[in-house]
Amino acid sequence: MSALISGPHTHAPTSVSIVMGHVILALIPATAYGVYLFGYPALFLVILCIVSAMAAEAISLFLLNKPIRPFLLDGSAALTGLLIALTLPPWAPWWIAVVGCSFAIIIGKHVFGGIGQNIFNPAMLARVMLLIAFPLEMTTWVIPHPLFSPTALSFSDSLNITFGSGIANLDAVSSASLLGYIKTELTLGKTIPEIMQHANYDPLTSFIGMKNGSLGETSGILLLLGGIYLLAMRIISWHIPVAMLTALIAIPTLFHLMNPDRYVGADYHILNGGAMIAAFFFATDYVTSPSTKTGKLIFGAGVGSVEYLIRTWGSFPEGVGFAILLMNALTPLIDHYVRPRIYGRTYLGKPIESPIKSDSK
Amino acid sequence: MMSLHEYKVLARDGLWDNNPVLAQRLALCPALAITTTATNGLGMGIATTMVLIITNAVISVFRNVVTPEVRIPVFILLIATIVTVVDLMINAFLHSLYTVLGLFIPLIVTNCVILGRAEAFASRNEVLPSAVDGLMMGVGFTAALTVIGAIREIIGSGTLFANASSLLGSAFSFLELVLIPDYKGYLIMMLPPGGFIVMGFLMAAKQVLEQRAAKKAQEIQQTALMQQT
């Protein structure tokens, strides 16, 4: 033991690998459901993402002359890989996974100086990069093909989708996501009630997750359970998810009440796209979000508002990735202006006057 | 008159030590905006080099006439005149290149490298060294832009020196290579983020090379000292 011990220290039983382990655990239900819903291609994608993220981590650490084993096995690279897999279209080809994961680890993480130094969330950065670079592959939404059901894919067909020639009968198995569908129909001059008649949208089914979408974003309830687990284990605090989801309920409700023909209700915004997974798993990244409670509230509300702005008036149907990256970039600014109170001083930085008058004169 | 050694220093400065893009971090606007192919980078580099040689020489001629108080407006006026001439010449003789670079050529006027060299070098030196400095800085700029353009082009669209014949004439059509057939393209490299990423990696590579060279030089010095003692 080291001899240098002064003062009573409390020992917090947390470390990078424990935190990462809890987050991975919280993501397992949503991942398993995604694999069930979309079949073996989704499983291949999850494995491929984790493996290529860890390989990219090992290569980066080797090139930077950093110790490989402790950093590689702390779980951070595996978590980044898993998170990327969950944001990908479930039948995406193998090279999407490899390009995305190596970009996240090499450019998103190690170029900035490794774990804890990155400005942007690496997984979100990779997802946005992939969306801009490969718009076709990244917006191919297949309808659910649950395992063990009559529509389930055979193992060899699945191999062919991920590693081979791709999806054979694309039009038969894919459909627009609800976010994209509504956006297209709105540009054709239809009103929301008209669109919703044909949209096949049911809030409960959407909450459970039986719909198309990215691999791990479909099931709101499982992501919510994962988030509650993280809150209960005190891995994340409530500020960012609550602020983000509140913004994403309050703003759409306001616009929906003003003009129900043009703006969809809040339930649709919460239950579709990546809102839920982003609120609990992407926006709450320690490194790229503010450190104070007030800062976290501002950050979360900002993510929710920007996401609504992009979804409603932007050119992309889903904007949560851009929203998070934008707020990541603003995090140093938020941390600059919103600081914790210094011990013994007021919030304005002035010394607190002692209530006990000294009589030593 | 400058000695041969001083000209060598000028060359080394422009090409490597004080490279306009990779060391001085000047002229990043064209370096990032135009370098979607190696040919574009080369064309922009050549145009800038032509301007740089002429402006440096002309400013050096006028350096003793212009009072320090009005030197910047005068320099800008001279640079703008020369850029306009180069702009019209490229439009007349290299028209297909002009369609690609058209927007950026008038902007050479405000290119920091041009005014930077005018201030830092041409206004204090004689005509010939100034022109040589312009040439070397221009070649360094061209090299940096061409390398950035080549890397972005290879990763972004799988080709190299596409449309080179429209820049250099049909004799150079052998330069046009398709390195990866049936490549779908990697769009991010053609967009501004690709420019930033490639330039960042090139700057890092330059640092690594310089650190290695410095280490080597130190080792040689140490062994020399050891042998003396």
Image (cartoon, rainbow, N blue to C red):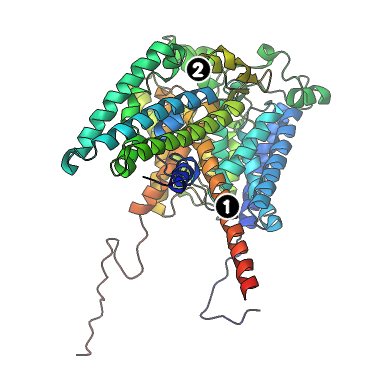
- Percent coordinates x, y for residue A38 in the rendering: 70, 27
Number of disc labels: 2
- Mark 1 belongs to which amino acid? Ile
Q: Residue at x 43, y 40 (%)?
A: B20
Q: In terms of image quadrants, where is residue A74?
A: bottom right
Crowdedness near tag 2: few (<14), some (14–19) or many (≥20) residues, C-alpha within 10 Å: many
Mark pair 1, 2: CA separation? 45 Å
Residue nearest the viewer, comparing B109 with A90 = B109
- Which numbered disc, 1 or 2, marks the residue closer to the eye? 2
- Label 2: element kind: helix
Q: Is residue B11 above or below residue B74?
A: below
Q: Is residue B75 left or right of residue B160?
A: left
- Percent coordinates x, y for residue A92 in the rendering: 67, 26
State which chain disc 2 sits on.
B
Quadrant assignment for the C terminus of chain B: bottom right
Q: Residue at x 50, y 26 (%)?
A: B42
Q: Is residue B163 visible?
A: no
Crowdedness near tag 1: few (<14), some (14–19) or many (≥20) residues, C-alpha within 10 Å: some
Q: Are marks 1 and 2 on the same chain?
A: no
Residue bearing mark 1: A115
Q: Is residue B80 left or right of residue A206?
A: left
- Mark 2 belongs to which amino acid? Leu
- Percent coordinates x, y for residue B46 in the rendering: 45, 26
Q: Is residue B102 visible?
A: yes
Q: Which mark is residue B167?
A: 2
Q: Is residue A193 above or below residue A214?
A: above
Q: In terms of image quadrants, where is residue A244?
A: top left
